[in-house]
Image (cartoon, rainbow, N blue to C red):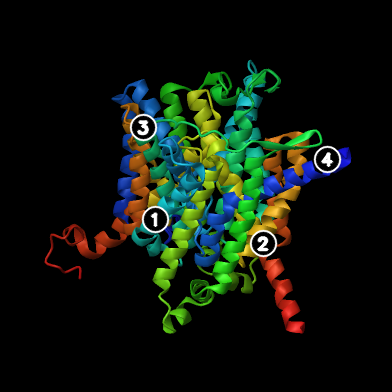
Amino acid sequence: MPRLLSLLSGPEDVGRSRWFWAAFVAVCIVLFVSPLWQSEFEATNNAYYLLNVPTALGLALLWGYCGILSFGQVAYFGIAGYVYGIVAGNMVGDSAGPIVGSLCGLAVCAIVSAIFGYFVFYGRVQNWIVPILTLVLSLLLETFLGQTAGYQWRVGTVQLGGYNGMTGIPAFQIGSYVITGYSFFYFVLIIVLVIYLALRLLVNSRHGKVMLAIREDAIRTELLGYDIRARQLVVFVIAAILAGVSGLLYVQWGNYITPSQVGLLQASLPVIWVAVGGRESLLAVLLSTCALNWLNYTLSSEGYQYALIIIGALLVVVMLFFPSGIVVTLAREVPKHGWRALLGWGDGAGK
Amino acid sequence: MDSFATVISVLYQFATNGAFLLLSALGLIVILGMMNIINLAHGELMMMGAYTASIAWHRGVPFWLCAILAFVVVGLFGALLERTIIRRFYGRELGALVVTWGISLILSQGALAVFGPFLPAIPIPGGSVAVGQYSFSVYWLTNIGLACLLIIGLWALYNHTTFGLQARAAMQNAAMARALGVDTGRIYTLTFSLGAGLAGFSGALFAPTVSIAPFMGQQFVAPAFITVVVGGATNVITGAVGSSLLLSLVKTPVGFLLGAFVGTVALLLAALVIIRLMPDGVSAVIQRRIDRRNRFA
C-alpha cells in the first residue's frame, strides 16, 4: 500500500506535495456532497462536464506522455455510443442490456483501434501521419452515419437515424436500479476519479517510464530493447477505450447521439482541452476539460454564436504563448517565482 | 465505336478523380513537402477561395478571373498567416498541426458569423461534349488540363528558377542555405503563400460543383489528407502525381460500382495498406528508384 501511494505521487504529474493531496481530498469531498445544495438539473450538467474527462485523459496519455497526437478520439466516442445504443436498444426489458451494451461498445473500440493502430505503428509511419489518418477515420464515420437515414438502416429494432441521430438509448442500470439524475452524477464522478488515479499509477509505473522514453527519443528506446511498436499500440488502444467510456457516458446521459458527435468540430474539442490545460499533466487536463466544457456550455446555452470562435482563438493563443498549457505553466512557474513575479508585480526577482 | 466510347469514358472518370485528388491536395503537399508543416486549415483556405470566387462572380467578374483572384487573395492571407503565427512553429510538427486547427475553427466559424450559412452558387461553366452514348463535362476536362498545367508549372518553378533552387536548398538543409545567404524566412513565407494560394485556387475551381458554405472545406479534407499521406513528403511533385493517380486507380472502380461514399472509404483503406507497405509514401519509393538509377548510370 505505501508503495502504491508513493507510485501515485511519482514525478510524472503536477501536484505531488502533501498540501496537494489534502486539497485533492477536500475537493473530492465537496464534489461528493455537492448534490446537497444543487438541483438535479445542475447535478446533471456537472455530470456532463465530467463525462468528457476520460476522452481528454486518454488523449493526454497518448499525446502528452507518449508523443502520439490523435485527432480522431471522437471516432471511438461515437463508435462506443452507437454500439451501446444498438445492443442495449435491442435488449430493452433485459436488465443486463446496458452492461452487455457497454462491454460491446468498449470491445468494438478496442478492436477498431487495434486494427488501425497495427497499420499505423507497425508501418512505422512518420509522426504527422497518425493525427491525419485518425481525423480521416472520424470524418468518414460521420459521413457514413449521416447517410443512414431511412428504415433500411436498422439493426434489430434500433434505427441508426441518419442526421436525426439515434434516439431513445436506454440509461445505464445495475440490476433493476436505473442510474439517472443525482446517481448518474455520482456514477460519472467515481468513474472519472478511478480513471484519473489509475492513469497516474500507469504513468509513474515502469510501463509509463518506457512510454515517456518513446516520447523523448523513439529510436534510442528501441535500441535499448523495447518493442516501441507494441507499446505505442497498447497506449493507442487504451486511449481509444477511454474515449469509448466517454461515449458510453454521453449516450447514457442524454439518451441520444447524432453523427455530428464524430464530426470535425467535435473532433477538435479534445485536442483543445488537452492543449489548453497542458498535455504533460493529467491533472491539468482534468481541470481544463471541466472548465472548457463549462465555458462552452454556458456560452452556447446563452445563444452566443461566437462560442467556438472564442475557443478556437483560445487554442491559438495558448499554442503561441503557453506551448505547454496554461495549468502546467502556472504549476511550474508559480513555485519558482511566486504569484507576484508571475503577474509582473514583483521587483523583477523572476528575471 | 461503342467500346471506344466506353474506354474514353473510363479514362475520363479516372482522370477526373485523379484531377480532383490532385487539386484538393496540391496546396497541402507544397507546404508539407517544403516546410514539413501540415496545414489543417487547408479546407478552410479552399472555402475562402470559393467565397472569393462566389462574391466576385456575382459582381460580374468572369469565372477564370475569379479563380485567379481567389489564388491572389488566399495567397496573401497565407503570407499574413505565416508571418504572424506559423513561423513560430517550425520544427514543431505537432504544434503546427494543432495551431492550424485552431485557425481552421476560427475561419469556418467566422465565415458562418459574417456571411451566414451559405453564399449564392455559381453555375458550372461550359457545356458538354458527346462521344458515342457518353457525354463529358467541358468544365472537368478543363480542370484535368489545369491540373496537368499546374504540375508542369510547379516543376518548372522548382527546377528552373532561382526561387526553386533556394527553396530546395532550404528544404534540404536550412542552416546551410542560410549560411550561403539564402533568406530562408522569405522562402518559407513565399512557399506557405503559394500553398495557400493553390488551396484557394482549387477552392474556386470546385466552387461551381458544390454548395458554397462555411463548412464546405470539410468534404475536401479527407481526400486531400489521404492523398498527402500516400504521397509522402520526400518529393513534392512525384508524390502528388503518383499518389493521386494511384488513389484514382482505387477510387474510380470502387466508386463506380458501389457509390461515392464507399469510394472514399476505399481510399482510407488503401491508404492504410499503402503506408504499411511504404511508410514514407509513394514519393520516397520513386525517389529511391531515381537515386539508384542515377548512381548506376
Residue B294 at what x, y percent from top left? 72, 80
The residue labelled by disc 1 is B76
Residue B220 at what x, y percent from top left? 57, 44
Q: Say yes or no: labels 3 and 1 on the same chain.
A: no
Task: Please report the residue visible at 56 percent of the width from the left and 20 percent of the height from the top.
Answer: A167
Chain of the residue on which disc 3 is drawn? A
Of label 1 and label 4, which has the lower sequence position? 4
3D distance between C-alphas at marks 1 and 2: 30 Å
3D distance between C-alphas at marks 3 and 1: 36 Å
What's the amino acid at mark 4? Thr
3D distance between C-alphas at marks 1 and 4: 44 Å
Q: How many marks?
A: 4
The residue labelled by disc 2 is B281
What's the amino acid at mark 1? Leu
Mark 3 residue element: helix
Task: Please report the residue visible at 47 percent of the width from the left and 76 percent of the height from the top.
Answer: B174
Q: Is residue A252 above or below residue A52?
A: above
The residue labelled by disc 4 is B6
Does residue A106 show up? yes
Mark 4 residue element: helix
The residue labelled by disc 3 is A297
